[in-house]
Structure formats: C-alpha cells, structure tokens
Image (spheres, helix red, strand yellow):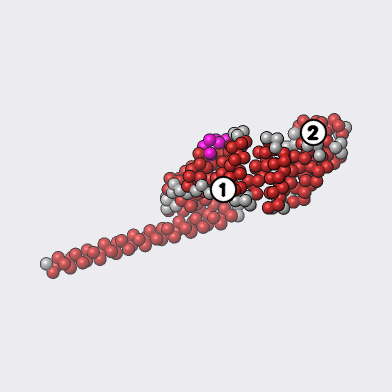
Amino acid sequence: MKQLHIIAIVSLWIIIILVDRRYAEAQNSNLDAVFYYNQGYDFEETGQYDEAIIYYSKAIEINPRYADAYYNRGLVYGRGKGQYDMAIADFGKVIEINPRYADAYINRGKAYNEKGQYDKAITDYNNVIKINPKNAMAYYNRGIAYEAKGQHEKAIDDYSISININPKYTEAYINRGKAYNEKGLLGKAIADFDKAIEINPRHANAYNNLGNIYDNKGQYDKAILYYTKAIEINPKFAAAYNNRGVSFFLKREYDKAWDDVYSAQKLGYQVHPGFLKALRESSGK
C-alpha cells in the first residue's frame, strides 16, 4: 500500500508540473499576442496601416479569440484603407466572440452604410440599441442610414433621440439641420446649425451649411460671410470655396467667383460643369 501511495503522490506532482507548464505557456502566448497588438496599435496611430494589419494579424494568429485585435484590424481595413468587406468580416468575428461588443456592431454598420447596404446597417444599429438603449452614437448612425434611404422623418427622430441622450452631440445637430433643410424647414435648420456653433465655435461645416441656407434664400452677402468663416477655420475646405464662388457668381462678382473656383480646384474639388459654363459665359473668360 505504501508503494502505491508514493506512486500516487509522484503522479500528482507530474500532473501539477504539466499543468503549471501549460499555464505558463498560455500566459507567455497571451503576452506575445498583447505585444503584437500594441505594436499594431502604434502603427495604426501613425497611419501605417499595412504594418498595423500585419501586427494585428500576428496577435490573432497567436490568440484566435482576441476580439480587440479583430476589432482594431477591422477599423484599419474600414476607416484606414476603405476595404469594407474585410472590415465587415473582422467586425463579424468580434461579434461571434462577444455578441455584446456594441462598437463592433456600430462600425460594421458604418461599413455596410459605405457599401450602400443601409438595411443591414440599420439592423446593426438596432442591435446596439438593444444592448444599450442610451447609446447616442447608435441612434445618430441609424439616422444617417435612414437619411440615405430618403426617410428624413425617421432620420430626424433618431438625431433628436441622440441629442436628448447627449445634448452636446454637435454632429447630431449638424445632420438634423441638414434633414430639416431637405424638408424646407429652414428656421429649424438654422437653429440646429447655430446650436452646433454654440457648442463648437470652430465647426467649419456648421458655417458652411448656414451659408448654403442663406444662399438658397437669396441672401448672398450673408452666405458669403458664413462661407468665409468656414474657410478661415479650415483653409482647405474645398466645398466652402466652391459654394462661396457660387454666391459671388450670383452677385455678378465674377473675378471673385473665379478666384474661389480656382482655389476649390487646387484642393481637388470637382466643380460642376454647368456652373463653370455659366461662369465662363457670364464673365467672358
């Protein structure tokens, strides 16, 4: 019996040693995966997207259930490289690993939106809202998808919910203002753009949108003031140059219109051929 007892103790120690060794190996593997993940993150932050993908992929190779590595690689594929199918696949893997990973649904929804698959995007945003009914970003992005489908009322409702959740959500005011403008509710649109500027006085797009409204109302001097403010904030805002050029054209200040057209074109903006033709004919250039 004593001999059997000794054998049992030795066997137990062997099992403990093997378990400890496997645990140590697993810990080392996890540390390696984290190392590669951090390297990938550093490359992503500096815009070196191909390198980031290599390192995130290495982290995933070591730990195939590393949800954050799939998530960040998905961001690089989507936001960084515009490879939306690859991004969708990675966000899908994140969701498979963790079905309550709300940001993965949001970013997969954005990728679907970029591909024009608005219903799939809406489904993803609905899933986020089920996980967290107070997720302002989910309502905001669902509003963008509804707007792309021409459902302006639904878009306005979603932007309004996101603003109720986060009253400082500047982009929600901007997009709701655009939706109001599409419906001809100019007073409400102006109020939203003004609110966006109140929250962020250096929001160039808010000034540009106010310029568009006043241009459409025939108040060209006021429109030019807003476009100029947008350009002062962001001197590379090509659309603002183009829009101000249109206002100058409508005021028959053709030289100023041409200056803005040239500025927009230098920044890569595709000026509408009809506008260019009208400006040439009117200015004699």
Question: Which stretch appears magenta?
Answer: 116-122
Residue 115: in sight, yes or no?
no
Q: Is residue 256 above or below residue 168?
A: above
Q: Is residue 7 magenta?
A: no
Tell me which amino acid carries mark 2.
Leu
Give the residue at mark 2.
276
- Judged by its main secondary structure, the magenta piece is helix
- Which residue lies at the image location 43% right of the left edge and 45% below the top edge? 96
Is 24 or 192 nearer to us in this picture? 192
Rendered image: mark on residue 67: none
Amino acid at the residue labelled 1: Ala
Dot placed on the residue nearer the N-terminal end, 1 or 2: 1
Residue 70 vertical position relative to residue 114 in the rendered view, above or below: below
Residue located at (74% from left, 51% from top): 233
Residue in front for this viewpoint, 104 or 269: 104
Q: Quadrant of residue 213?
A: top right
Residue 46: image quadrant is bottom right
**Rendered position, 50 above or below 1:** above
The quadrant of the image that shows the C terminus is: top right
Location of the N terminus by quadrant is bottom left
Q: Are marks 1 and 2 in contact (CB under 8 Å)?
A: no
Which element carries disc 1, helix, strand or loop?
helix
Inspect this view and state whether residue 192 appears: yes
- Rendered image: mark on residue 136: 1
Viewer-side residue, 101 vs 285: 101
- Residue 181 vertical placement versus 55 (above, below): above
Identify the residue at horizontal 44%, vertical 52% (top origin): 66
Give the residue furthest to the left.
1
**Is residue 244 or residue 206 the one in the foreground?**
206
Q: Nearer the viewer, mark 1 or mark 2?
A: 1
